[in-house]
Image (cartoon, helix red, strand yellow):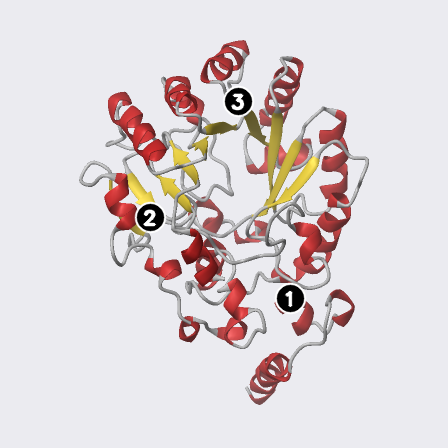
């Protein structure tokens, strides 16, 4: 699959851009430690130049993110610069200060849609975010739908809201939401300090079938989008993917291949979710020192994905039958849980094999796959 991406050409088709790290919430599951604004954030002139650079590289879609992106005083001007280049643009907000003013700014920017973070029902949402935030984000959803803005919702699944998936789905359909992205909390940033909120990997055994069932609802006006950290393979693989896609199954992490992330100080990463506040291993450079095209085309850049070799895989990923397609799944998830980009326990196929759930698989596990867990069991017994 990497060769397929290489033949298609490494191009930043989608970008997630952190306009500011400033945030009016302190969410327990925030992966970027958002709160205070960075001391060295790009000014408006620099941001508009970055927008031009993205267009020149052929970027097709940009998500304006944060922190809380609406705390950037010119977020709508940056959005308009991008849409003037015929780039599709949306924004992700926590909804705390979303008013008619922001709706008009979204119209000015000609956004293709707005998305709000809703993490369960009221008690669950407010427990991980801030008391009163549920009411505000629901009001933001309702006002945006009423104004005719295409409105979506993002939900991070954790130990508090994991059993509320069907109820949240029904709630969003009733409120006229057109799209729902579901992702799993990864223990980086603030969530690293709240391990009690992290979903155990075996919960994929019920979460994946549940999401697949919701995606199969033919008469549902809202589309469910499992994020790239949910999967992979097994009986429900095609149900998780876009059936209109040329390749309707997981083809591995696209960070640095077709996806780019930009931090508010100009740091460039293959994916915005990848951490940069520790050793900076995923930072490819800074836009104040280099043009985006230079960083994107730099020999040796984004090596963890572009220069992948099978020998890098560890743990179960090294023996998995899908290893050359999957390449360890989501880079952020693998690294966040194991410190190893190429050993990922948050894999539906892996969990089904480990727990003997052959009813969830489309074919029997291979001998090396079952032997991997047999050896682990023997090691535990011997210890």
Q: Residue at x 61, y 23 (%)?
A: 150
> Considering the image in quadrants, where does the C terminus appear?
bottom right
Q: Residue at x 58, y 26 (%)?
A: 133
Asked if residue 100 is positioned above or below residue 97 in the image, the reply reads above
Asked if residue 85 is positioned above or below residue 296 in the image, the reply reads above
Residue 306 relative to residue 117: left or right = left
Q: Secondary structure at mark 1?
A: helix
Between discs 2 and 3, the one toward the N terminus: 3
Q: Nearer the viewer, residue 195 or 76?
A: 76
The label on residue 276 is: 2
| Residue 70 horizontal/vertical position (percent) | 44, 22
Q: Nearer the viewer, mark 2 or mark 1?
A: 1
Q: Residue at x 65, y 33 (%)?
A: 179
Question: Outermost residue, front direction?
Answer: 7
Residue 59 relative to residue 184: left or right = left
| Residue 46 horizontal/vertical position (percent) | 25, 27
Q: Nearer the viewer, mark 2 or mark 3?
A: 2
Q: CA distance from mark 1 to mark 3?
A: 38 Å
Q: Dot 3: few (<14), some (14–19), or many (≥20) neighbours within 10 Å?
A: many
Q: Which residue is mark 1?
A: 349
Q: CA distance from mark 2 to mark 3?
A: 26 Å
Residue 364 relative to residue 317: left or right = right
Q: Which residue is mark 3?
A: 96
Q: Dot 2: few (<14), some (14–19), or many (≥20) neighbours within 10 Å?
A: some
Q: Nearer the viewer, mark 1 or mark 3?
A: 1
Q: CA distance from mark 2 to mark 1?
A: 30 Å
Residue 317 in view (yes/no): yes
The label on residue 67 is: none
Question: Outermost residue, left direction?
Answer: 289
Question: Outermost residue, bottom direction?
Answer: 382
Q: Nearer the viewer, residue 141 or 86?
A: 86
Between discs 2 and 1, the one toward the N terminus: 2
């Amino acid at each position: 699959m990497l060769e397929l991406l290489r033949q298609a050409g490494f191009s930043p088709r989608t970008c997630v851009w952190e306009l500011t790290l400033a945030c009016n919430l302190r969410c327990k599951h925030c992966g970027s430690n958002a709160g205070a604004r960075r001391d060295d954030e790009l000014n408006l002139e620099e941001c508009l130049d970055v927008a031009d650079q993205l267009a020149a590289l052929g970027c097709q879609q940009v998500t304006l993110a944060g922190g809380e992106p609406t705390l950037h005083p010119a977020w709508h001007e940056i959005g308009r610069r991008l849409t003037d280049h015929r780039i599709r643009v949306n924004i992700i907000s926590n909804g705390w200060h979303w008013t008619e003013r922001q709706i008009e700014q979204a119209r000015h920017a000609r956004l293709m849609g707005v998305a709000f973070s809703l993490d369960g029902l009221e008690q669950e949402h407010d427990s991980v975010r801030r008391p009163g935030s549920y009411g505000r984000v629901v009001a933001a959803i309702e006002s945006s739908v009423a104004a005719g803005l295409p409105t979506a919702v993002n939900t991070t699944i954790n130990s508090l809201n994991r059993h509320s998936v069907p109820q949240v789905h029904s709630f969003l359909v009733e409120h006229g939401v057109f799209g729902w992205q579901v992702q799993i909390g990864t223990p980086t940033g603030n969530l690293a300090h709240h391990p009690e909120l992290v979903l155990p990997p075996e919960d994929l055994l019920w979460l994946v079938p549940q999401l697949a069932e919701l995606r199969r609802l033919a008469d549902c006006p809202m589309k469910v989008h499992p994020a790239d950290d949910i999967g992979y393979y097994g009986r429900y693989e095609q149900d998780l993917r876009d059936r209109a896609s040329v390749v309707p199954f997981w083809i591995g992490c696209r960070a640095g291949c077709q996806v780019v992330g930009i931090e508010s100080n100009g740091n460039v990463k293959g994916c915005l979710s990848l951490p940069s506040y520790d050793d900076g291993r995923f930072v490819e450079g800074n836009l104040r020192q280099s043009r985006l095209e230079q960083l994107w085309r730099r020999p040796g850049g984004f090596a963890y994905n572009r220069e992948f070799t099978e020998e890098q895989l560890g743990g179960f990923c090294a023996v998995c039958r899908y290893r050359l397609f999957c390449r360890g799944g989501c880079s952020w998830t693998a690294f966040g849980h194991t410190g190893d980009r190429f050993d990922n326990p948050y894999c539906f196929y892996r969990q089904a094999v480990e727990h003997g759930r052959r009813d969830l698989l489309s074919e029997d596990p291979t001998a090396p796959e079952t032997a991997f867990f047999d050896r682990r069991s023997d090691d535990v017994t011997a210890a």
